[in-house]
Amino acid sequence: MRIRPDGAIVCAMRCFWLLLVLWGCSGAETDLPTEDPCQGGDTPTLTVGTGDSAYESTTAGQALDLVRGAQGGVHLTLAVDATYLNPEERLEATLTGLIGGQPVGLSEPFVSLRCNPDTNTLQAWGLRLIYDEQPDLLDGQATDVTVELTDVDGRVATGSTNFLINDPEAP
């Protein structure tokens, strides 16, 4: 059997790739995360923000504009930033708003989460927390907001914050 002169190079390349694969399987330490926050995991997290077309972070006590709907209702527009929930199917959500400890806002939509590759988190926006009060009674009020998401695997993440309701159409 005759070996071509480039046969040694081919053999060396095969050995290199074999060693590379074996090194990758050896459990060598890396800086890569062991879990993907954009997939289900053990400890889901949830942060409440705002945003109609993207998640925007907020600070506690921040003023948030009250939106008057076309059919006479009013709502706050919320968004969420989460980790370790299963985004494969829609999640059940409960959005609640308290004023003075009394429940005055409630919505229970289904939510689709999208992975944001820039933050490596799951996000949803354009969520409507509907209030059962007249706008003039809500304007200037502090509201405690809680969002709870439950994924198809039964994992639950809860986030809370508070806002100052601002009615831009108030006299």
Image (cartoon, grey):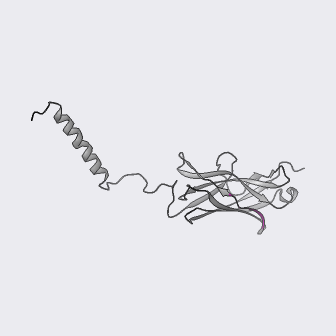
**Dominant secondary structure of the residues highlighted in magenta in the image:** strand
Residue 68 lies within the magenta run: no
Residue 113 locus on image (x, y percent): 60, 53
Q: Residue furthest front?
A: 1
Q: Quadrant of the N terminus?
A: top left
Residue 147: quadrant of the picture: bottom right
Please, which residue is most extreme toward the bottom here?
101
- Residue at x 65%, y 56% (from the top left corner): 111
The residue nearer to you, when weighing 111 against 52, is: 111
Q: Which residues are magenta?
A: 103-109
Return the x and y of residue 8 as percentages of the image width and height: 16, 35
User: Residue at the location (86% across, 48% down)?
Assistant: 169
Position above or below: 112 against 153:
above
Q: Residue 55 location in percent, x, y? A: 64, 49
Depth check, front residue: 87 or 97: 87
In the current view of this chain or complex, which residue is farthest to the left?
Answer: 1
Residue in view at x 57 percent, y 60 percent = 45
Query: Compared with residue 92, is residue 5 higher up or lower down, i.e. above or below?
Result: above
Front residue of 139/123: it is 123
- Residue furthest out toward the top: 5
**Quadrant of res 118:** top right
Residue at 57%, 53% in the rendered image: 122
How many labels were placed on the picture?
A: 0
Question: On the rendered structure, is 156 left or right of 134?
Answer: left
